[in-house]
Amino acid sequence: MAGRRKLIVVSNRGPVVHERDASGERVARRGGGGLVTALRSLVEEHDVTWIASAMSAEDKVVAEEAAGEAIPETARNGAPYRLRFVVHDPSEYDWYYNVVANPMLWFIQHYLWGLVSEPDVDQGLHHAWSEGYVPVNRSFADAVVAELEREPEAAVFFHDYHLYVAPRLVRERVPDAVLAHFVHVPWSMPEYWRVLPDPIRRAVHEGLLANDVVSFHTRRWRRNFLRSCEDVLDVEIDWPSHSVHGDGRSVAVRARPISVDPAEFDEIAASPAVEAEEASLAAKRPEHLVLRVDRTDPSKNVVRGFRAYEIYLDAHPEMHGRVQMLALLDPSRQDIPEYAEYLGAIQRAARTVNDRFQREGWVPLDLQIQDNFPQAVAAYKQFDVLLVNAIFDGMNLVAKEAPLVNTRAGVLVLSENAGAHEELGEWALTVNPFDVAGQAQAIHAALTMAEDERRRRLDAIVGHVREHDIGGWIEDQLADLDEARARLGAPA
Ligand code: G6P
């Protein structure tokens, strides 16, 4: 692999959020989400400028002080990188994030619309698209173009469904730029994209095809994307090479499964914070622990998971008092009504299980709604069964992280619609996320599986994740960029 690269990373959420502490001092807190962790080695080893939305009031002050320019930041290993905040008008940002990106695009890409009565594509959506999503993408594109003027050799890495329109806006102004886009969520089948009016679904696809490389976590999402380009834009697909041809350009579409840093998890698992959490969990844990760790997102299918556990308890009275489901859920996107309602549904479903089965000294389902990473890692070490039953999921990193540090030959019960299933399915117990009876049976099968079989499966998962780690994911993408440059005849 070539040495240091000049890269411009573009994502809605950035690597740090600035705040004021109690004494009024400015403090920089690490931004939420797995993307920051995933891209850490890029920032540490290459010349990176990261462009992200100003999230907090203090981020906006930082951006103003920098007069819109990038500010110097320091990576974990001490390496310098640059961070450029894009400040958005609050209404535009609300339409972009709370109306278009989530729920509309997120719900389309995870098949969460039922279609009988929702969504209504009304004036509100059209307005949020043209007055929110597009202007916010334009602001991102302006920032990218400004950075490319400063550093014309840099390659641009867009991330996710917030930024589908930006690449085209950049391409129009910098035709020779090298642009790549990673879509971290599933790509749904072409017909489902017809929820969106033609001009909007075309803009989504044309925006993505303005890149030189578009990547997904799985071959399945890639296949859907290629089909959907064919259907929505009527472009020519070269299936053997997974590329799209049109406008005199070709776009390489790649399947590059994201992963984690195993060494980091080894270190976190042995940290005092995790050990303290683990001691308190171990002191109260039942004989058998069924774990789930998720954001409170409708795509995660928490309510059906609770229902499956209820069916399991119904069928197995001998396990009453001996098993517990621990649900560690991180509250997510609560400004969006669909998410707030789903959190209510989660709480009601947990209550139903506990009302039916609880008895003196036994809580069948322990629901904890908070963001507590050390607690989650402690539970990763302690689970006997890990339930990942997502309706659809781009990858699902919990399915990779938790087995890495597990100490009890725990069994992974995994949705066939989680991206992780393409890699880990053969060693997991596969479930259909809608089949609650099947999930109940899988919980039973996992809890009664012989120890050597459990160990064999867990070791295989751990071996796979250690071999296909985050470093490999980054290298593959840099190689994809090299290939794109070679195609374009641009210098590396
Ligand atoms: C999940 C998805 C990512 C997405 C992120 C946005 O982690 O897997 O693809 O970028 O959510 O979350 P946010 O909290 O910023 O809405």
Image: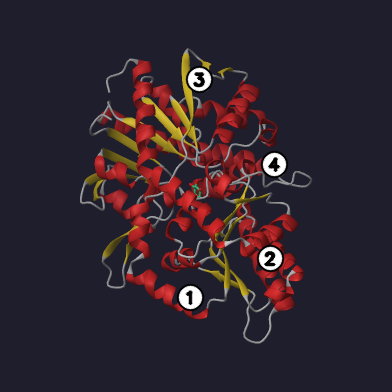
Q: CA distance from mark 1 to mark 3?
A: 50 Å
Q: CA distance from mark 4 to mark 3?
A: 39 Å
Q: CA distance from mark 4 to mark 1?
A: 49 Å
- Earlier along the polypeptide chain: callout 4 or callout 1? 4
Q: Is residue 420 visible?
A: yes
Residue at position x 64%, y 64% from top? 448
Badge 3 amino acid: Ser
Q: Is residue 18 visible?
A: no
Q: Residue furthest right?
A: 116
Instruction: Name the mark nearer the viewer: 2 or 4.
Output: 2
In what element is the residue under mark 3?
loop
Residue 40 point in image, percent of width and height? 32, 47
- Earlier along the polypeptide chain: callout 2 or callout 4? 4
Q: Which residue is mark 3?
A: 241
Residue at position x 47%, y 18% from top? 250
- Earlier along the polypeptide chain: callout 4 or callout 3? 4
Q: Which residue is mark 4?
A: 122
Pick the front one: 404 or 206: 404
Badge 2 amino acid: Tyr
Q: Which residue is mark 2?
A: 309
Q: Which residue is mark 1?
A: 281
